[in-house]
Image (spheres, helix red, strand yellow):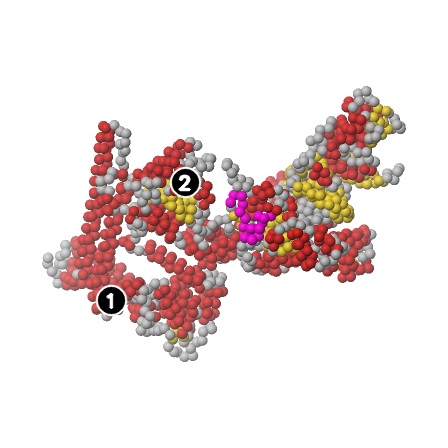
Amino acid sequence: MPASAQIQKKESDFRELPVIFGFFIWWIKVVPSKIIYIAKKLTLKAFAFFSIDLLLKTLILPWKRDEVDTTNMALDDRLKVWMMNLVSRLVGAVIRGAVICFGLLTIIGIFLGEIIALVGFILMPVIIIALIVMSIAPIKF
Amino acid sequence: MANFDIQRAKNFRKIHAGKSFQSGFFSKISGLSWAIVLISFLLVVYLQFQATGILANISFLLLGASAGYLFIFYFSKNYYLPKSYINSENLAESLSPQAVEVIDGALEVARDNKFSKIEPIILLAALEKNQDGKYILLRCGFGLEKDISGMISDAILKVPRAQSATQIEFSEETVSIIAAAHDNAIKNQRSEISIADLLLGLIERSDVFKKMMFEIKMEEADLVQVVKWHTLLEDYSNRNTRPFWEKEMTGGIGRDWSFGYTRILNQFARNLNQEIGLTGEVHVYGRAKEVEEIERILAKSGENNALLIGDQGIGKKTIVKGFVSNIVKGDVLPSLKYQQVFQVDTGAILSGSGDDSEIAMRVKQLFNEAARAGNIILFFDSFHALVSRAKGVGQVNTSEIILPYLQGGVRVIGATSLKDYHRDIEANPGVDGVFDKINIAEPNAEETVQVLEEMVPVIEHRDGVFWPYQSLKEVVRVCTRFIQNVPFPKKAIDIVDEVSVNVAKEGRKIILNKDIDVLVSKKLEVPVSEAEGEEAKKLMNLEEFLHKRVIGQDEAIKAIASAMRRARVGIQDRKRPIGTFLFLGPTGVGKCVVGDTLIPTREGLIPIASLSTQKKFAPVATINASYLSQISGSPSAWFDEGISDTVKIETDSGFKIEGTPEHPIVVFRKDGQFEFRALDKVNKGDWVAIKYATNLFGKVRIDPDISYLCGLIVGDGRISWNKRSVLLTTADEEILSEFKRIYGKFYDKSLGYYPKLDKYTYHAINTRLVNHLFRIGIKTVTAEFKEIPEQILCSNKKSTVAFLQGLYDTDGYMENNGIVYSSASEKLARQVQSCLLNLGIVSSVRSGVKKYNSKKQYYVRIMSPFHNIFYNKIGFRLSRKNNLLKKLLKKVNNPNKIIYPNLKTFLHPIFLALGASKNKNPIFWHKIENYIYGMRRPTKIMLEKILFEAEKADPEIILTDEFLQLKKILTANFYFAPVVKISKGRAKVYDLTIPGHHNFIANGFISHNTETSKALAEAYFGSEKSMIRVDMSEYQEQSSIYRLIGSPPSAGNEGEKGQLTTAVSDSPFSLILLDELEKANKQILTLFLQVFDDGRLTDGTGRTIDFTNTIIIATSNAGSEQIRENILKKVVPETMQKSLLNYLQTQGIFRPEFLNRFDEVVAFHPLTQNQIVQVATLMLNTLSKQMLEKDITLKFTIEAINKLSQIGFDPVYGARPMRRAIQDKVENILAKAMLTNQIKRGATVILDEKDIV
């Protein structure tokens, strides 16, 4: 059997089981795996979108690599240029740092969303029953 | 037998259940449920999760119920999803959902039609109803010309039906098809049997389907390709519909911040990453290796530049775009991950002001910016332009500037052609060394089809057309066969583009093979599609068609016709020309005229026999065939062809030309077209064109008075060499006084002459005078042999005119309202006629007998419309005669002598245009009507008036072909005269070659070359224009090879274009006629060895010219004496052929290896008696057609034909005397009978043997 068919077979295993068993496998294993997979993909996408690795590598490089060459300059001019370059680096570092932070926050958000989705899905039957019960016999919080 | 049990297949059970979850009722409810969930959730939030109150209760209930529904729905949807997997135990479980639907469909068809078994055709019917199946079948070409459903229905009718209701089974054949589909799925690593696999199984195992595919010219391999194509398009579609977390990231926001500015790059270059990010991935077929190579080169450290070398149109840019696609996907090595590829506009960066330093600065800034940015790869499409050493606008050598960057700092991808690489880059070792070269080969046909498959959906969407697979194959086939000078895939892409637009314009949707064939045929002017219908019939009867123009020579015609047939159906050797033939024949096949024929040249009127005495040939008068205007052409060669049979024709105005029977002259046909016709094919009554006003005079300066004196002496004088005296006989005091004046002025101031030897004869004894006249060319001959002196013929206009004045003053006179010059010498009379013609004066020459001495006299009578021109240009010096001329001019000026025959066709549209003005000028309009109906012929003045009025009536008529042709004829200075006399002779003949024009004026007649090969050009290529004629006598020197194949470019020069190679390159489907092959230099002949062997020739610039679509015919006069001798010895044709070949080789005329390369070497041997009968029949049929025009039916008995054949046959010259025999024995008799009313209109004449006397 080809590899792709083996994978296909594995995925479709729960469909071959009787309904009840199939339901439990789907509920506990298949969908949560999918949620984790999507979360992983989103995390990678966010990482790539915010170019976190590249920004970390180039954190303190001058902004847009815009650096003035000080060859054959007088000392005071060199000092001025050095200050300007430093400012350029600081600007770069600040902006990059902000983007890195924002990216990390997004990734944390994805992670939290993943947790919520996972827990929520697993508890979904309980939530549904609770909602129905609450509609009949209200519970005070 | 494989197990196929749908009852036990789980996916079959689930299919029906799953249908409603996929797209049925439950699916629709789920949408509603989501809405309820959202609303109720918001309500719950609003109510702060307090489950009190009715609203809260309802919210909670709805929320819970909807969420529950959705939870169960999504589980059911996934659980009942009929996903299959490959299972060899039960094939039914391996079927994909669509395949299951097809099987269901087949079952339904079987049930409806009461079939007991599901045969393959029923499976095909079900496949046809499936969307994917129908799409693949359409791509294969089903349903384009015949309705596919109809085809399937017809086949289904043959399936046996069940007598009673039984359980439907799958036939063995159908199960084996599904098994084959299963194996195919495994082979292609698919997880289930798809629609495509079923179709592949069908073609593998079903005879019915195989037959259907055969009918639409599709094979199994083609279906496999179509399936792959379909899969590919599906993949693209699926990729576009992926969820966003599956899609590739096209760089991040940090990329631009981490690398430098690209201001200059943005100005002069395009960011390919951005473009591909927007347009989508670029797929590059068959180039994965090249893309990987680029990646490897750019990823290494140090000098990491790649140079792609390949011809224009081969796909270099596409390969680079494929590499960029990989960068965009992130599918590259880490060091290339954030790189951006900029395609630099080399033209923009190198253009601008003429200052090179500005351009150099710009280039430096560009590279500097790329280096600073840190993540730039520069791509130059024409990299050689940056390092070219050629001088010119936009040519700047920046190699010194860019070399440091190339050595480290900037990654560069360059693209160039092989020729440019060798010329510009290889010559620069520094630049060459920093690049890793990647040779890009032209994709083959299969790869090209794949490229087209990729691009066709875009074109289909743009133009709203549909491309079946065979049409793509046809594009590739036609491009491979007929378009040699452009590589794949460019030529195929261009054709696809153009055909799509054309078909869309016509409002059609489906591209058929014939659309492609029609387009390519039109572009290349050659038949492309398979020969069928009329063309196939013509090809089968090609010998007959050719024989209409070429009499006899069955062997040669058969050889050529066979080669044409082989080529047309595509079974000839593709690496050689279509056919190569060498025809050997006796002399006389070129343009040959007798020696005293006068040729107007820039050195004067020169007899053709004397042309060879010139150190360098002076330009002769020729005609531009397109514009009918006179131009000059310099002869390149002159030949004495020896003594030959000749044909002499004479017009009613006494214009004569004598030449070999094959010598063609211009004839003005009945349909108004000009045609070159051999002298022996010219008939009495044919109108020939005489060119006047050539106005070509020599450079010899003779004082006009001396020329006049020469005229007097030629007219009425003679020279006595012994006595060193010149005698002049005249009764005219004015002539005498003029003679004295001139003599006294130049020769003897003391006027030493002795008057009056007799009453009217004066003589001057002066050695200087005699010597001078002798040097001018006056000969001591009797009156019958007088001629214009050679130097006078070569003198300038003034001298020529003065000489003519002298002649006219002596022997010219006014008679019957005409200007006449009389002479006892026919040659002198004709020379005077030629001189007058050169000056623009048309005259007629008649002979008569002098009453007082019964001697023959020749009278040159100037036609009345030219009297004024004579008066203005020549006139008389004698006042007496001049006064008479003036009186004549006042009295007579009949312009009606210049008439134009055969203009009906051209006058017709003009006649229609003038129809509106009929009532305004009915007389004029009726005159035109007479011209249209052939009752009259328009004169020059009338024709001018017609054109003038036509332009007034309809200004747009000046753009019509007919008007333009009439205008050309009117302004061409042609005089048309009918042929009245044709006779035979035998004389020494001469040949002349004028390269580029191949025609010249001889005695006023326009002469040209043979037309034999034109028949072949017309037969195969559809037009005589497809014939390339190369006169090999122009290539007698080895150095002339460059004129044939072109010369290589040298410093500052592009090199000369070759006559042959340029012509074949421009028109690869042609007939090449190599005339007079034996006259070419032997080294030049060796060039043709590779042409005959490989069908290719490399020209002077290094280009390979393809000859595989040409027919090459070489003619040669070599061995003609051998042929004659063999004929006289009555040698059989086969032996004659062998001895002839032997002769050619032993005499060193042609080398054996050269002769061996011809497909056929055919000696033009004489006709047999049977063939003579055929020739006679052909000629008599032509005569019958002519008689039919006069409403007389002419028939011949077989005995009459046989007798004529005997009379017209000569063992040496074959059928040449036949024309004379028919003329003498038939035409003359008919002419007399018609004149005496023995034969009237509507009569039927049957000529029997006894009538041929």
| B1078 or B824: nearer the viewer | B1078
| B953 or B1086: nearer the viewer | B1086
Query: Which quarter of the rendered picture does the C terminus of chain B lie within?
Result: bottom right
Q: Amino acid at mark 1?
A: Phe
| B985 or B1044: nearer the viewer | B1044
The percent coordinates of residue A85 (x first, y second) are 24, 35
The residue drawn where x is 43% and y is 44% is B416
The residue drawn where x is 81% and y is 25% is B766
Find the magenta span and give its range: B1084-1102
Q: Which mark is residue A14?
A: 1
Q: Let me know if residue B740 appears in the view.
A: yes
Instruction: Tell me how many marks there are.
Output: 2
Q: Residue furthest front?
A: B1146
**Chain of the residue where label 1 is placed in the rendered structure:** A
Residue at image mark 2: B429
Horizontal placement of B691 versus B67: left or right?
Answer: right
Q: Secondary structure at mark 2?
A: helix
**Quarter-wise, where is residue B357 in the image?**
top left
Label 1, residues with CA under 10 Å away: few <14, some 14-19, many ≥20: many
